[in-house]
Image (cartoon, grey):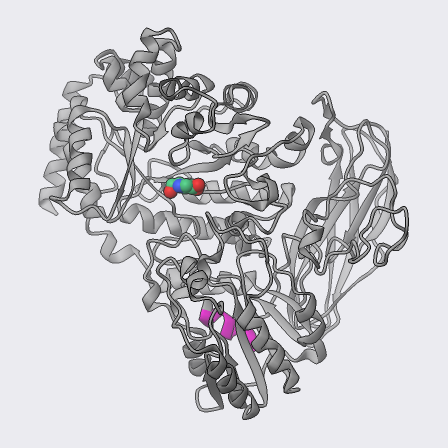
Amino acid sequence: MLRTFLSITLCCLLFSTVHAYNPDDERYIDNLMSKMSLDEKIGQLNLTMGGDVVSGTAEAAKIESLILKGQIGGFFNVKGVDAVARFQHLAVEKGPHGIPLLVGADVVHGYATVFPIPLALSCSWDSAAVAQMARISAIEATADGVNWNYSPMVDICRDPRWGRVAESSGEDTYLGSVLAKAYVEGYQGNDMKSDSSMMACVKHFALYGAAEGGRDYNGVDMSRERMYNYYLPPFHATVEAGVGSLMTSFNLINGQHATACDWLINGILRRDWKFNGFVVTDYGSVDELSRMGIAHDNEAAAMALRAGTDMDMVTGRYVADLNDALKKGLLTEKMIDDACRRVLKAKQRLGLFDNPYKYCNTDRVNHDLYTPEHRAVARDIAAETFVLLKNDNNLLPLKKKGRIALIGPLADAGNNMAGCWSGYCYPESHKSVLTAFREAVGNEAEIIYSQGSNIYYNETMQADCDWGRRISRVDDSSAHSEALLAASKADVVVVAMGESCEMTGESSSRADITIPDTQRDLLKKLVATGKPIVLLLFTGRPLILDWESENIPSILNVWFGGSEASDAIADVVFGDKMPCGKLTTTFPRSVGQIPLYYNHLPTSHPDHDSSRFNPYCSNYIDVSNEPLYPFGFGLSYTTFSYSAPTLSSDVLTADGVLKISVEVTNTGMFDGTEIVQLYINDPVAHIARPVKELKAFKKVDIPAGKTAVVDFTVTSDMLKYYDAELNYGCEPGEFSIMIGPNSEELQKLDFRLR
Ligand code: NOJ
């Protein structure tokens, strides 16, 4: 303790003599930069990757040598505060000018305590919960040395084949923007100088969620009107919330690489939105420019920097090529200075020049990680994210009595509960659903367990997506038989099936998004027994559930709920907590309908009855246009009825407000929570507008038998959009406003904007 204190004091003294100005002052950066060589400035633009860096290894030696040469501005994914502290001390005490390092990590939905995957979190429609999860993530990650976080991921996703839909907030721009802001506020806290705040890095700029065919790393071709109206606003929301940094994306945008898009980074981000943070590439993107035929090898770095990308993640090309590129006239020295200044300012914003060791308190790690308090919050939030898709005859909640068969490859797989991007947790110590169920029922009921099947029949396919979170292999045929035997002894069968946790996330696109083969076969056999069946669906994306929705009485979508998922599942299955989540992505009936999203544009030959085929209408011969489960949909154990809504006036003026009100009554037996949704449609505009767009929502607790009055304020801002010339505004005329429990069951009223 005393040693740490002395070393901090010494270091601050060292700093104050070397750099005369207050570390918060702009002149501090001027003064520092005036002493830096061109190569040292370029060094600040280099980001290298760590891993489990242990002293004396080649990886550690590489980082140490970069630090000593002043060729590194930061590193990422180095695990553990001890390693971080070692490198930070080296940088400050032995590196040129003693400049502290950024320490990055992907803390996407929790650190040691893991919360549900972001797609699940979005289904809570609860920005306070998201902000709380981000705050706890920041407390834990900063205790372990991290000061810069590669989250939130705010890509809008309309294609569930893309694995990274799991990391997103779903398909909606408005909800995505509200939650994007909450992430940033939670990570960065009220004061980024606090020891428990880390700088957020919003990603991936931009349009990555629209990768063609849902295939990861594929290109995007998109109109400006679409990107401005739907894909860019969540990024803008984080800029307005003061996000400190931004990561570019891997994809092509209309033939240009996102990392080298001047109009996007220098233009929209910096000029139009006034973003004053710094921009980092995604992993290896500078090399992609030459690989994709956009730049010659040694010109790629110049191209990215010219477009406004300040920091190069892992390729080392800025360090290798920028100096030469400058000599060739491919960029100016000012561009390097500007980028270096932005990186140094980020360090200043984090308070690293005041105290470079603020994230190196090796004591905190013993107290702040995976605490009972954090885990209790994670358990509560997880329960909020589950979506009850079906519940015939109120099969759920289950009573804690009799014999309950728990079957499926995810039933005793605690290591799979955390979901993708959970590299800093302890998956082997996470409780399985089986253990949680046994603890929940105690002696009151018997839980009969059978694994029942593998994830896939094909062992290689299963291994390809287990990424170290292995689920035991069994012989499918005998496992199916054992499961049927278990079911035959039970009063009710709970099936834990779906995707294993790494089947979504980066590099996890799927073309067939059904429940994998052996599991679905087993499910069919279990249904044939005639026993009542509850499906606990594990997934990181919408799945095609056409058969399941017809044949399984109860389906509870539990996504991947994090380290405390199993207890949260038991809480909801046995009725200690109510399910209240609602979908933030549309569940299609068939892969052939994709992309299928609720806020689509009108079609030229619309269908009068889109649930069946009509010639010369925009529909398919073999499947209806309707989703299986629409955006905004989710049931509860209780029921809600909506009164006819009322509007305060049928005329809205440009600077006026309207109030829309609806009475929502809890008509069931349990206290519950309802997410009331408000949509708007502009039937005639400069350009065709979506059939409906979410513009507001409220989450309300309503006791059984009680009624809540839910009000929304409508302003003309909610009616604005970008037209084909990218003018932003709204036009006088008729509008419809719709209110209801999901994007399909809506009651409509009309008003006029004057
Ligand atoms: C690649 C991913 O696309 C990005 O989201 C992540 O932050 C970086 N790798 C760093 O791990």
The total of numbered circles placed on residues is: 0
Q: Position of residue 30 (x, y in %)?
A: 29, 14
Most common secondary structure along the magenta stretch: helix
Q: Is residue 277 visible?
A: no
- Residue 498 horizontal side relative to residue 43, left or right: right
Report the front residue among 740 and 650: 740
Q: Quadrant of the C terminus?
A: top right
Look at 48% across and 51% down and name the residue there: 508
**330 shown above or below 597:** above
Look at 38% across and 16% down and name the residue there: 338
Q: Is residue 460 magenta?
A: no
Q: Quadrant of residue 641?
A: bottom right
Q: Position of residue 651 (x, y in %)?
A: 87, 36
- Residue 666 horizontal side relative to residue 168, left or right: right
Magenta range? 566-574
Q: Quadrant of residue 537?
A: bottom right
Q: Position of residue 293 (x, y in %)?
A: 47, 24
